[in-house]
Amino acid sequence: MRSNGASFYRELLASPPVLAVLSGPSGCGKTTVADAYVKKKSARCSVSATTRPPRAGERHGVDYFFMSDAEFDACIRNGELAEWATMYGRHRYGTLNRTIQDAQKVGGDLLLVIDPQGGAQIRAKYPLAALILLVPPSMKALKRRLMRRGTDSEEEREARVQEALNEIQAANFYDYVIENRDGKIDEAVKALEAVMEAERRKMAARQAAFAAAASQ
Ligand code: 5GP
C-alpha cells in the first residue's frame, strides 16, 4: 500500500470514476435528472449517436450526434459502438466506444442515458457499471408528462406509453430504482448522488483489495 491511515482511503475514494447507466421510460425526466446531477458534480453525460432527426433546438454534438442510416450502419460495421438499439421500431441510438474511452482517460463519472437494451450490452462489456432505473410515480403521471412535453405526435405518444411499460419490465436486471416524483427533481438527484457515492465506495473497496494484494 502506498500510504497509511486516513489519507490512503481518501485517495481511494477520490479516484475511481463510476460508469453508470440511467434508464427509464420516455418522459420520466431522465435527462433533467442527469443534467442536474452533472451540473452539481464533476461528472459528464455521454452524447449518443442517433438516426432520429433533430427536434427544434437540438444541436449536433451537444444533444446527439445525428447520423444518416448509412453513417450508423458504418459505425456498426466498424465496431465503433459500445451498444446500440432500435427504439419504437424506428430510429437507432447508440453509444460510441470512444465516448467511454475518452471519459475514462479524463477521469470523472460518466452517465449513459440509454434504454435497457443498451444497459444489457453495457453490463456485458463493463461488468462494474451501475445500472439505474428512473421511474415515474405512476403511469398516469407519465402520460400527463408526455402530453405536457408536446413535442411528439399522438401516434408517437401512444407508442411511447406502451414502450414505457416494456422499458420498466425490461430493466428487471438493474441494480437501483429511483422514483422521480412530480416537482421533486431535487429528491431524485439526491438519490442519484447516493447511488453514485455507494458505487464509488464499492470500486474503492476493490482498489483497496488490489493495492493490498500488490503490496505483499
Ligand atoms: P429521444 O428520442 O426522446 O431523445 O430518446 C428516446 C430514447 O432513446 C430515450 O428514452 C433513451 O433511453 C434512448 N437512448 C438515447 N440514447 C441512446 C443510446 O445511445 N443507446 C440506447 N440504447 N438508447 C438510447
Image (tube, rainbow, N blue to C red):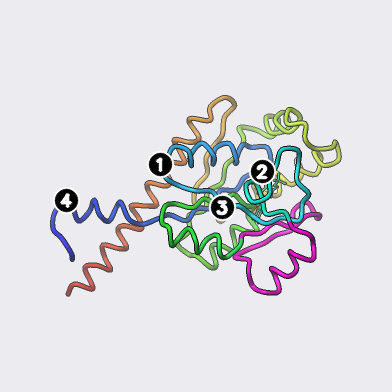
Q: Nearer the viewer, mark 2 or mark 3?
A: 3
Q: Which residue is mark 4?
A: 6
Q: Which residue is mark 1?
A: 194
Quadrant location, the N terminus = bottom left
The picture places residue 93, in percent across and down from the top left corner, at 70, 56
The picture places residue 111, in percent across and down from the top left corner, at 52, 50
User: Foreground residue, 44 or 177?
Assistant: 44
First-in-chain label (1 vs 2): 2
Q: Amino acid under label 4?
A: Ala
SS of the residue under disc 3: loop
Q: Is residue 1 above or below residue 52?
A: below
First-in-chain label (2 vs 4): 4
Structural crowding at the residue carrying mark 3, measured as other residues with C-alpha within 10 Å and reported as few (<14), some (14–19) or many (≥20): many
Please report the bounds of the magenta region as a residue range.
67-95
| Residue 179 appears left or right of 143 | left
Q: Nearer the viewer, mark 4 or mark 3?
A: 3
Q: Which residue is mark 3?
A: 46
| Residue 33 appears left or right of 202 | right
